[in-house]
Image (cartoon, helix red, strand yellow):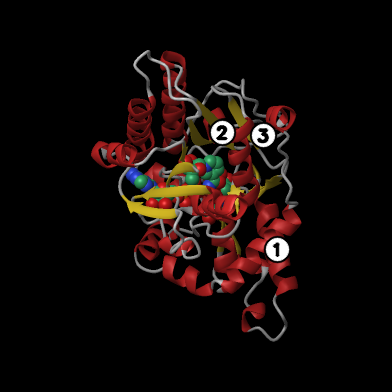
Amino acid sequence: MRTYLVTGGAGFIGSNYIHYMLKKYGSEIRIINLDALTYAGNLENLKEAEGRDNYTFIKGDICDKDTVSGIFAENDIDRVVHFAAESHVDRSIRDPEVFVRTNVLGTAVMLNCAKKAWELPDGGFKEGKRFLHVSTDEVYGSLEEKGGYFYETTPYDPHSPYSASKAGSDMLVKAYMDTYKFPANITNCSNNYGPYQFPEKLIPLIINNALQGKKLPVYGDGRNVRDWLYVEDHAKAIDMVQEKGRLFETYNVGGHNEKQNIEIVNIIIETLQEMLPGTDPRRKLVSKELITYVEDRKGHDRRYAIAPDKIREEIGWEPETMFRDGIRKTIQWFFEHEDWMQRVTSGDYQKYYEEMYSAG
Ligand code: NAD
Ligand code: TYD
């Protein structure tokens, strides 16, 4: 039985990945989820996994060497899937330091503890061990409006404190691979959307605001482009890279689904209008009149777009969920989880939201 150590499994992508893996492999695998439960981590996301013999949650910080090395000492970990990070660009602009701590230092601790647990006296590593570092396409910087794609060979050029800290963490993984032949891979993925996404990010924020008749804040001219991938497709890519990818390689993961932010906002409004029955009181609240252009994000990257040729050719992964289906599934999930949304948007999130959008 393979044992996985998943970091950040209570967050958006991590929880979707855990659900995907438990569904795919059932009791053939064991998952240990290490998560500090920051504002972005929510154990409610994993209700269905709790109670299974092959799933364990550990509350802990990836920067804490003793916690992480203790997990490796007590368990024969075969796979590390490292999601834990501070993940929101706007927060990184307001408070960069925690991004450096978690994303850079936390990754260093994870790498070092895995290396110590897995290395052999001759300097090699135990057979079959693999570390996957989950990263972002934002490390490549910004593309021109009609200016090509990000490839694995594109030079790093991060702009935000978030992407700079992720670039730093990627470089550490590369250093471990180059220096020690540490058995790892990096995946750089485009923007994800789907169930359990925290409503500070564009898609869940727009869904949540529209359903309450609140303003829909669009930064700048609304024409920045992101390449959206349904989160379950990302979970599948991660599993495929760990099982079929060549060690030490980087794979870009993308949805072939570029859209301007304003297009996304319009699609969400139209889809909500289609999906809400006329009798639902929220139907009257959802309107394009809610769209409000607000001050642009500082250093706002214009366009991201992934060329996922390598992962398709070497591994056979392709995005499967068309955006029109993925957005309906996502909206349906939010319809069915109003209580989830209410709980995650109370308290600290309210304060963040008021400070962030008070000028808009
Ligand atoms: P998220 O913010 O939803 O979740 C992050 C999780 O990490 C939370 O559960 C949080 O509690 C946990 N965490 C934070 N600091 C921690 C610490 N010090 N110790 C232990 N746990 C800690 O993030 P997400 O959107 O699920 O992103 C997961 C990963 O995927 C990140 O590494 C991110 O950079 C990367 N990524 C995200 C996207 C995206 O569109 N969301 C795209 C590409 C790559
Ligand atoms: P976001 O979901 O924060 O992801 P990222 O910055 O990592 O790509 O933002 C996606 C895009 O949407 C980005 O161009 C910024 C824009 N945006 C808005 O226009 N309004 C908003 O309220 C938010 C959160 C984002």
Label 2, secondary structure: give it.
strand
Where is mark 1, residue-wise? 328
Q: Which residue is mark 3?
A: 306
Q: Secondary structure at mark 1?
A: helix
Local packing at callout 2 (Cα closer than 10 Å; few below 14, some 14-19, many 20+) is many
**Residue 112 position in % (x across, y down):** 34, 28
Q: Amino acid at mark 1?
A: Arg
Q: Earlier in the sequence, mark 1 or mark 3?
A: 3
Asked whether mark 3 lies closer than 8 Å to ligand 1, one says no
Pair 2/3: label in front: 2
Q: For marks 2 and 1, give the CA distance.
A: 27 Å
Give the residue at the far left of this rendering.
66
- Circle 2 is placed at which residue position? 187
Could you tell me the amino acid type at mark 3?
Answer: Ile
Residue at horizontal 37 percent and vertical 20 percent from the top: 120
Please, what secondary structure does the residue beneath circle 3 have? loop
